[in-house]
Image (cartoon, rainbow, N blue to C red):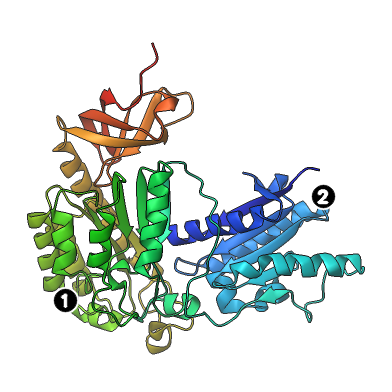
Amino acid sequence: MSRKKLYIRTWGCQMNEHKSEGIAGLLARYGYELVDRPEEADLVIFNTCMVREKPEEKIFSEAGMIRRLKEKKPHLLLGVGGCVAQALGRKILERSPAVDFVFGSANISDIPRLLTELEERRRNGHLRPGRDEPVMAVSKIPDRLEDLPFLRRSRFQAKVTITEGCSNFCSFCIVPYTTGLLRSRLPGEIIREVSELAAQGYKEVQLLGQNVDSYGNDLDDPDITFAHLLRALTRIDIPRIRFTSSHPKDITPAVIDVLAERNNVCEHVHMAVQSGSDKVLRDMRRGYTKEQFLELVYELKKRVPGVNVTTDIIVGFPTETERDFEETVDLVKKARFGGAYIFKYSPRPGTISYYKWPDSVPPEEKQRRLEHLLQLQKQIVAEDNQKRVGEVVEVLVEGEAKPGSGQVLGKTRENKTVVFPGRPEWVGEFVRVRVTSASVAGLFGEALEVSVPVPT
């Protein structure tokens, strides 16, 4: 008997990608195997996110495509989960007839039950359950993280969630309302999971949380902190430990101490600044000033050799004036980020800023500010990458640059992309590479030493 086919479409951050690995692992226990195309599937899951612009429109547009597939495959099921599902609930079912069931941010474990309910209704002749009888599980966010059997896509890189939720309530952010308040896993659980991954031969683990540096703040134990956790993980025999994302107001000197030592914690810190204007930072409820942020950047660069500091920036926040924007430009010039995700402000119903201020910055002005910062950031990255020419770097190969191109790509410890001639069997291995050229896209080089035998 052939197994049922599952396709998962994921929006949002790496935490959502990891959640999708949990969905895949859970449904594998019920006879589903992953496929790469919705056309091949018996079950399609949308794992949604509300952080970026116009999330609902994208999801309903994709649902329309699945509805057309259903005309050819009437047995095909579509489930919607994640942040949008948590926020909208049954409204999703009312708006899109293509959606069969809905599950909230902390209701992944309910998917098998929802599928059973759908099958029972179909056996009873109800091919499309009425919108007044929704098949859904959207509950209050619990105090603990769901325990899921993750089906990891990679054999050498693994994601490990250490916190979920956030208690900061930045004025523009929907996360506390859709994923709940901060919830930290106990350190023993995390250490055990990373130790098991090391025993299985994984070479890189990425610790995930909306704000990893707030780890332990909800556990009322002074000995459970992010710095203590990192210190414990340095004792595990695994080559690389990464983490994302950091909140500037929560990074402690103890965390910088761990980063500054020679160990398996990688020299990359992603911390969202969002704005360079003190006024806008106050309106955003970020908890630091421009000067404090820059002092943190300078301290990291002084203490941690080769550290790569990356960030997120929002342009066009409702209270951002041209002068405020120029403060952000000045900060970018001084911080010289190794990379930046730059977004136009998008109002989110339910957030503080949505109710407090009208979305007053015109779309064309948001676009101008976005393009200005993007151009500046590209210039900085191109200049700093050029300084790396001639260096020898350690690269963990992640895949082929393009199928059949004869080139592979991977990442350095500080999360810089490197492309160089190589073989597909090098994927998952460490390679020493001499950087021969550079651009805004990354570094380019030639292999010097590979940790696997090179075929003749």
Mark 2 crowdedness (10 Å alpha carbons): few <14, some 14-19, many ≥20: few
Q: Earlier in the sequence, mark 2 or mark 1?
A: 2
Secondary structure under the numbered disc 2 in the rendered image: helix
Task: Name, please, the residue furthest toward the bottom.
Answer: 356
The residue at the point 28 percent across, 64 percent down is 229
- Which of the 4 image quarters holds residue 124? bottom right
Query: Would you name the residue on which mark 2 appears?
Result: 72
Secondary structure under the numbered disc 1 in the rendered image: loop
Q: Amino acid at mark 1?
A: Thr
The reply to whether residue 286 is in sight is yes
Query: At which x and y percent is residue 102?
Result: 66, 71
Task: Name, please, the residue furthest toward the left.
Answer: 302
Name the foreground residue: 373 vs 47. 47
Query: At which x and y percent is residue 215?
Result: 31, 71
* Screen quadrant of the N terminus: top right
- Which of the 4 image quarters holds residue 27? bottom right
Name the foreground residue: 277 vs 168. 168
195 lies left or right of 19? left
Q: Is residue 351 above or below residue 146?
A: below
The reply to whether residue 330 is in sight is no
Name the foreground residue: 147 vs 312. 147
- Which of the 4 image quarters holds residue 451? top left
Q: How many marks?
A: 2
43 lies left or right of 239? right
Mark 1 crowdedness (10 Å alpha carbons): few <14, some 14-19, many ≥20: many
Query: Would you name the residue on which mark 1 appears?
Result: 289
Task: Name, please, the residue furthest toward the right.
Answer: 125
Q: Amino acid at mark 2?
A: Lys
Q: Is residue 446 above or below residue 282?
A: above
Query: At which x and y percent is residue 158?
Result: 42, 50
